[in-house]
Image (cartoon, grey):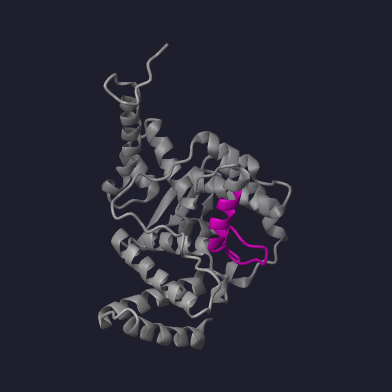
Amino acid sequence: MYGDVLEGLLKDFTAFLSLERSLSDNSIAAYTADVRKFFDYLEKNTTITAIAGIDSVVAEAFLLHLNDLGIAANSQARTLSGLKTFYKFLLVEELIANNPLQLVETPRLQRKIPEVLSVAEIEAIFKAIDHSTPEGMRNRAIVEVLYGSGLRVSELINIQLSNLFLDIGFIRIIGKGNKERLAPINPSAIQQVKWYCSTIRPQMPIQKDSTDILFLNRRGHGLTRVMVFYIVREAARAAGITKTVSPHAFRHSFATHLYDGGADLRAIQALLGHESITTTEIYTKVDSQYLRDTVLRFHPRSQYHIPRR
């Protein structure tokens, strides 16, 4: 899609890194490889055809894609650093008017407690979606499935009609490493998916390569990861939620709410499709954080202690 234009830019970028930044050949090779990786992702997952059409949401979706592939946080940070340098170069050369990556945060190099939505916030997002439009009904089904089954965004966009077993409450999911699992789907999400399948999807001009894909765009193609980011971000904005909400926030909330409700950690591991229990254990830290906050607020030796009246 970008072809010769990208190759020309990379040639100039290489010269910039060598002459202006005095980087080593290995560093230059790593930076250009990161840029190629990013544009390969854009070509496969978005409909963006111009460099100027890229924004921070796309960049954040790319980072989440790297995370889904199991890329370590330090490698993600290095990739983002390379991309930011590339966009600084484009800015210096006046090839773009502003830098869309300027406000994209570097991934933390240590495991952190994930962003979790409260039940009230999730309900507010559901209610804020405009159900009077075909896209709204589709979007409601999307967020219901994200929260109701704890799916990765890559798993959501690849759900096939032939893998829906709604009568018994399951979806067959093809996860990371092509591993299959059966994900339970709750009654509310089942209802929304059935409404979408019976009233909205049949009216779409379904393309040949998407006949078995559940969630489609208005042109009848499967959704991209970036499109799901936009859907979730807009729904959260409409609900008046100011924190940054991504599709993964629903997955984190799914797991956290199950754990808080008393679900076994091994069961949550299976539901999320985690290979290692260590990955799932991060949700126990959410509860630990609550306990720490309780001590800070109520212990008499805490500076945050608020005496009872």
Residue at the far top in the pictured view: 309
**Residue at x-position 32% and y-position 27%:** 296
Q: Is residue 89 above or below residue 230?
A: below
Where residue 264 sits, quadrant-wise, is top left
Q: Residue 178's x, y, as percent? A: 38, 62
Q: Residue 291's x, y, as percent? A: 32, 29
* Bounds of the magenta segment: 211-235
Q: Residue 266's x, y, as percent? A: 31, 41
Q: Quadrant of the C terminus?
A: top left
Along the viewing direction, whichever of 207 and 84 lies nearer the viewer: 84
**Residue at x-position 49% and y-position 49%:** 244
Q: Is residue 288 magenta?
A: no
Q: Is residue 304 above or below residue 268?
A: above
**Residue at x-position 53% and y-position 52%:** 164
Q: Residue 56's x, y, as percent? A: 50, 62
Number of numbered tags placed on the structure image: 0
Q: Is residue 197 above or below residue 52?
A: above
**Residue at x-position 40% and y-position 13%:** 308
Along the viewing direction, whichever of 293 and 85 lies nearer the viewer: 85
| Camera sees residue 184 | no
Along the viewing direction, whichever of 155 and 9 lies nearer the viewer: 9
Q: Is residue 227 magenta?
A: yes
Q: Is residue 275 above or below residue 85?
A: above
| Camera sees residue 7 | yes
